[in-house]
Image (cartoon, helix red, strand yellow):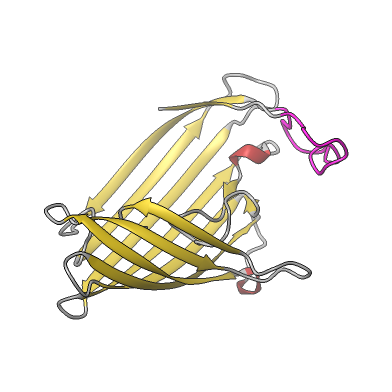
């Protein structure tokens, strides 16, 4: 069961928020959602997997409880991950994620799917690109060259799109490198340092991001 209450206000007079009066529920709103999840997991570890498959599907329903412009509709998400050892110290991981939100009414902007995070589509900050649907894929090579240290190289692609506007031309690139320091050898827990790069918008620097986190990205 999920409950969210959102409130927004503009801090920059004349900014994009103030100049977008068509945003549904622009000042915020509330919704409650009931979710059902089905999961399959054959990984040999949920912290540093070297073999196995993980798959999760989730369906959520938000009934019309609060009225007004508050969100009422459905949410579907799917997350599939596959890992295999290429050599004793080299692991290849792949992940596909799909998210979709729908409603018979205009969608509040705060429930639209957002691309980018420290785990998927690294380099893009969450919230810059958002729409009704989100599709992303990433592949990562993990080389643990000693008990304490490892390096990774990753790449992928993804996009957000409307109900009928998916196109391969909209897919955005994502790639980068990272380092790992394993501070708990018993549980294979590591601190990761990732640097991700994305597209180069016209008139801007190439999108990028640096992340420090505990455990692998996926």
Picture quarter with the C terminus: bottom left
x and y percentages locating residue 183 in the rendered image: 22, 54
Depth check: give the residue in front, 206 or 139.
Answer: 206
In the image, taking residue 126 as reference, residue 36 lies left or right, namely left
Figure label count: 0
**Outermost residue, top direction?**
66
Residue 106 highlighted magenta (yes or no): no
x and y percentages locating residue 129 in the rendered image: 64, 55
By secondary structure, the bulk of the magenta-drawn segment is best described as loop
Residue 18 highlighted magenta (yes or no): yes
Q: Is residue 131 visible?
A: yes
In the image, taking residue 173 as reference, residue 33 lies left or right, namely left
Q: Residue at x 74, y 32 (%)?
A: 26
x and y percentages locating residue 139 in the rendered image: 39, 71
Q: Quadrant of residue 150?
A: bottom left
Picture quarter with the N terminus: top left
Depth check: give the residue in front, 43 or 143.
Answer: 143
Residue range of the region highlighted in magenta in the rendering = 9-27
Check the image and report above or below for 91 versus 192.
below
Check the image and report above or below for 40 versus 153.
above
């Amino acid at each position: 069961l999920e409950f969210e209450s959102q409130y927004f206000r503009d801090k920059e007079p004349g900014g994009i928020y103030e100049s977008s009066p068509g945003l549904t529920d622009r000042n915020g709103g509330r919704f409650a959602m009931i979710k059902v999840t089905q999961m399959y997991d054959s990984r040999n570890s949920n912290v540093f997997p070297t073999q196995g498959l993980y798959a999760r599907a989730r369906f959520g329903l938000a009934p019309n409880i609060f009225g007004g412009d508050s969100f009422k509709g459905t949410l579907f998400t799917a997350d599939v991950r596959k890992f295999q050892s290429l050599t004793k110290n080299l692991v290849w991981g792949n992940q596909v994620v799909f998210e979709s939100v729908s409603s018979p009414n205009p969608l509040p902007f705060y429930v639209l799917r957002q691309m980018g995070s420290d785990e998927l589509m690294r380099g893009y900050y969450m919230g810059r690109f958002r729409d009704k649907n989100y599709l992303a894929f990433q592949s990562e090579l993990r080389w643990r060259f000693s008990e304490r240290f490892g390096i990774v190289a990753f790449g992928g692609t993804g996009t957000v799109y409307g109900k009928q506007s998916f196109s391969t031309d909209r897919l955005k690139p994502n790639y980068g490198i990272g380092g790992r320091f394993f501070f708990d050898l018993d549980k294979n827990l590591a601190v990761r340092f990732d640097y991700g790069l994305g597209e180069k918008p016209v008139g801007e620097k190439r999108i990028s991001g640096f992340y420090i986190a505990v455990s692998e990205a996926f």
